[in-house]
């Protein structure tokens, strides 16, 4: 399929018009995209579908109508024929979209671009940041609004091993998956930023599940009450959690 898709793209670049009357550039909200949408393609058409998070699967019930390819959070569809119709099921990290593709010679060579946006990604908030207290669960910072049901729960604890401080974390995802990166976890001690040694890079915690892990740092630099800050992402919404921990 990959070879045929690349060959099709080469033919399109040589033969397709610069702008067809049936070209489409459309932006949908997540709510609109959850309803059945119809994509009208034809032989030589190219559709680019962009979603708020990573696409994990693309399924059609009839082969031979479109070629399909996943690239991160995008789906590329290439029309192969001038007639027929098939349901299109797109699965992402946070949900599914059931659409329909119809093929017609009237839309041959068209270019279709559909972008699905998460409304939460552009919302703003002015809620003041709460002051963390020692050994209480980490609270999200208002870098961006995260719905209460979607917000993860992050908690930290420490164990001192000689000159090394082992920081244990617990991440419980809410109603939607949460994405974090240990390399972005920061610690503030009495003398400023403390060098953190991560053991993992990017990690995704599926909705409703819990993930545990550890990082290490200098016990002397961390002091007795280090402040832990860890950015995270839910969909396209960026936020962060912060907690002050008491070193035993």
Image: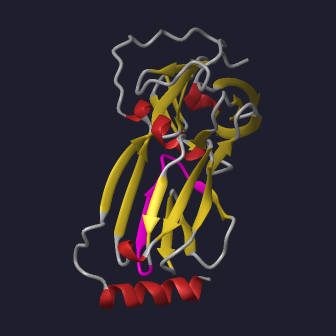
Task: Identify the coloring.
Answer: secondary structure
Look at the picture and state if 210 lies above or below 78.
above
Magenta residue span: 43-55
Which image quadrant for residue 120? top left
Residue at coordinates 69% horizontally, 65% vertically from top-left?
A: 61
- Residue 138 vs residue 12: left or right? right
Image location of residue 199, percent across then percent down:
68, 49
Taking depth in this image into account, of 236 and 31 the one nearest to the observer is 31
Magenta-colored stretch includes residue 47:
yes
Look at the picture and state if 58 lies above or below 137.
below
Taking depth in this image into account, of 154 and 247 the one nearest to the observer is 154
- Residue 50 vs residue 225: left or right? left
Look at the picture and state if 45 lies above or below 34.
below
Magenta-colored stretch includes residue 151:
no
Image location of residue 75, percent across then percent down:
51, 63
- Residue 127 vs residue 91: left or right? left
């Amino acid at each position: 399929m990959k070879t045929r898709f690349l060959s099709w793209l080469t033919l399109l670049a040589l033969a397709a018009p610069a702008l067809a009357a049936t070209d489409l550039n459309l932006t949908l909200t997540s709510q609109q995209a959850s309803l059945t949408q119809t994509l009208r393609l034809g032989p030589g058409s190219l559709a680019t579908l962009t979603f708020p998070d990573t696409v994990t699967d693309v399924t059609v019930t009839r082969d031979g109508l479109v070629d399909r390819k996943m690239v991160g959070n995008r789906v590329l569809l290439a029309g192969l024929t001038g007639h027929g119709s098939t349901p299109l099921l797109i699965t992402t990290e946070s949900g599914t979209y059931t659409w329909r593709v119809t093929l017609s010679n009237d839309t041959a060579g068209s270019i279709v671009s559909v972008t699905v946006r998460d409304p939460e990604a552009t919302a703003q908030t002015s809620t003041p940041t709460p002051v963390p207290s020692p050994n209480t669960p980490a609270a999200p910072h208002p870098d961006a609004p995260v719905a209460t049901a979607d917000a993860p729960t992050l908690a930290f604890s420490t164990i001192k091993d000689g000159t090394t401080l082992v920081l244990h974390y617990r991440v419980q995802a809410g109603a939607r998956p949460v994405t974090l990166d240990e390399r972005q976890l920061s610690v503030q001690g009495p003398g400023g930023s403390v060098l953190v040694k991560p053991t993992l890079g990017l990690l995704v915690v599926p909705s409703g599940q819990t993930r545990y892990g550890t990082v290490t740092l200098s016990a002397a630099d961390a002091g007795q009450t280090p402040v832990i800050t860890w950015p995270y992402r839910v969909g396209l919404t960026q936020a962060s959690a912060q907690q002050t921990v008491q070193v035993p």
